[in-house]
């Protein structure tokens, strides 16, 4: 019975993938994983249950996107502003992150490499150690790269880049007159390609400090669906809508 279920699921996923134009896929998809708390509240569950359901959805959608041919995915897991939440919720999120990182078979079958962006300095030593292990153990996978944004903020990232550039200029390592957009990009957390498509579920219509520098010409796709309920069908619809848009990048 389990084999039949998995077979039917893969067949359904293949049908979704066949709907999209493989020659016009977004190279980099950003996901603001919103609505976990509302999903849990609507079911009379603690917010932590919503976050665990959201983590399972991230795994499912990442595997599906990798099968589709998406090269880069950045998922907003924990923002610099999320420290304002109740301590119990923060502790539950950090425990969930550890469980996620310790899953040695996480995304292995889909050849997904795991990297991180954000300020790691305030995270616990155990979390930083597990992040480093996850990066090292997945380094040889080259189909899709998943960036988890943890303790990340777009303004913080740009501020850090400007500070680094100023320090280099003060040390005589860089000519201030030669600073370009590329100079700033090179001093961000990592040189990931600009985001082609940003997906935000749960009915909110804002960036929430997510990839501000990299989203200058991003397309946006919004949905009222809470993140834990986000499906392969929803992801496919986002890609189809993206493929029907005319990206002019300031031209005609």
Image (cartoon, helix red, strand yellow):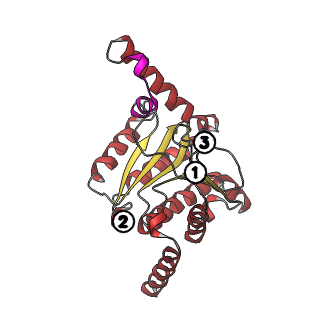
Work out whether mark 2 precedes mark 1 in sequence or the reverse, and give the earlier one: 2
Residue at 51% across, 29% down: 158
Q: Residues within 10 Å of mark 2 (few under 14, many from 20)?
A: some
Q: Left or right of 249: which side holds 164?
A: left
Q: Residue under label 1, please give it.
A: 248
User: Residue 108: x, y in percent?
Assistant: 34, 62
Q: Give the Cα distance between marks 3 and 2.
A: 33 Å
Q: Are marks 3 and 2 in contact (CB under 8 Å)?
A: no
> Which span is picked out in magenta?
175-186
Q: Residue under label 3, please give it.
A: 88
Q: Quadrant of residue 169?
A: top left
Q: Left or right of 247: which side holds 3?
A: left
109 vs 211, nearest the viewer? 211
Work out whether mark 1 precedes mark 3 in sequence or the reverse, and give the earlier one: 3
Q: Give the Cα distance between marks 2 and 1.
A: 33 Å
User: Residue 234: x, y in percent?
Assistant: 60, 67
Q: Which of the labelled discs sits on residue 110, or is there none?
A: 2
Work out whether mark 3 precedes mark 2 in sequence or the reverse, and give the earlier one: 3
Residue at 44% across, 84% down: 7
Q: Secondary structure at mark 1?
A: loop
């Amino acid at each position: 019975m389990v084999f039949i279920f998995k077979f039917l699921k893969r067949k359904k996923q293949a049908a979704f993938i066949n709907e999209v134009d493989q020659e016009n896929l977004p190279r980099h998809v950003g996901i603001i994983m919103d609505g976990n708390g509302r999903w849990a509240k609507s079911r009379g569950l603690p917010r932590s249950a919503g976050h665990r359901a959201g983590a399972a959805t991230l795994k499912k959608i990442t595997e599906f996107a990798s099968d589709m041919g998406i090269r880069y995915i950045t998922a907003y897991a924990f923002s610099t502003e999320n420290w304002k939440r109740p301590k119990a919720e923060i502790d539950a999120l950090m425990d969930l992150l550890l469980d996620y990182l310790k899953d040695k078979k996480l995304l292995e079958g889909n050849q997904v490499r795991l990297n991180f962006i954000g300020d790691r300095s305030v995270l616990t030593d155990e979390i930083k150690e597990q992040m480093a292990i996850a990066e090292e153990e997945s380094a040889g996978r080259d189909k899709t790269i998943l960036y988890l944004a943890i303790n990340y903020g777009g303004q913080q990232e740009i501020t850090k880049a400007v500070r680094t550039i100023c320090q280099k200029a003060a040390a005589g390592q860089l000519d201030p007159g030669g600073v370009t957009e590329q100079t700033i990009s090179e001093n961000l957390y990592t040189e990931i390609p600009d985001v082609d498509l940003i997906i935000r579920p749960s009915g909110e219509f804002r960036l929430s400090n997510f990839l501000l520098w990299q989203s200058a010409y991003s397309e946006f796709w919004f949905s009222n669906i809470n993140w834990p309920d986000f499906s392969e069908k929803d992801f496919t619809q986002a890609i189809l809508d993206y493929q029907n848009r005319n990206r002019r990048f300031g031209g005609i």
